Amino acid sequence: MAKGFTDSKGNFRPTGNSSRSSSKEKSLETSGIELRTTLNPQNESGISKGSREKIEKVTNTMNQGLVLDEREINFIKNTMNRHPDRSTRPEVVQEMLDATWNEDGHEITASQNEKGREWLNRKPQRDRMGAREAGVMDDFKEIRLIGITETHSGTGFYIPFWRVIANDGSTFEYRNIGAEISIDG
């Protein structure tokens, strides 16, 4: 007989050594209790229903031109880093990546703008800037998310790609790789 206990709903819950799983499975099968094989069931694309819904929500936010917050940007980046291989990437994840790329950039929250401005004005970042970038920072208006990109071609590690815009319309693009800035345009 399988060791276990009955929970508050009257369901039998097995306990003990997992090496006896085959005998437990047999006794559970005969007791009519279904074994649960995964904690987070996934569909054929390898993405749980909850993750799919979150991906679709964030994609819709970008497609509608709504403001992105830090949590959404990190979700996009982290999702891409869980699915780096384009050949096996679920379609819904690729659609989200495609939606990040916007020539005008995605608006981000005021707190994200301030956080980015403060980071860019730190000495290590300012020391890596040329006169053009420093001029944009001195006349700072906003930062926009341009897309999510790989750190280097083919590495499979994704990070945000940003555009800094000055009040006079001048700009520069950058990625932060670790604690360092990489100015790209």
Image: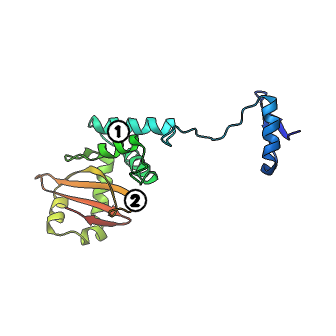
Q: Position of residue 3 (x, y in %)?
A: 86, 41
Q: Amino acid at mark 1?
A: Thr
Q: Residue furthest toward the right?
A: 1
User: In the image, residue 121 lies at what x, y percent?
Assistant: 27, 63
* Distance from Cα at disc 2 to Cα at disc 1: 20 Å
At x 30%, y 71%, the residue is: 124
Pointer 2: what residue?
Answer: 157
Task: Tell me the residue that label 1 is attached to.
Answer: 59
Q: Position of residue 41 (x, y in %)?
A: 58, 38
95 or 128: which is nearer to us? 95
Residue at 36 percent across and 45 percent down: it is 94
Q: Position of residue 99 (x, y in %)?
A: 30, 42
**Residue at the image point whose x is 39% and y is 36% from the top:** 56
Dot 2 amino acid type: Phe
Mark 2: secondary structure: loop
Q: Which color scheme did the rendering employ for the protein?
A: rainbow
In which quarter of the view is residue 119 placed? bottom left
Residue 163's disc number? none
Relative placement, left or right, of 168 versus 64 is: left
Q: Nearer the viewer, residue 85 or 10?
A: 85
Residue 14 visible here:
no
* Label 2 or label 1, whichever comes before in sequence order: 1
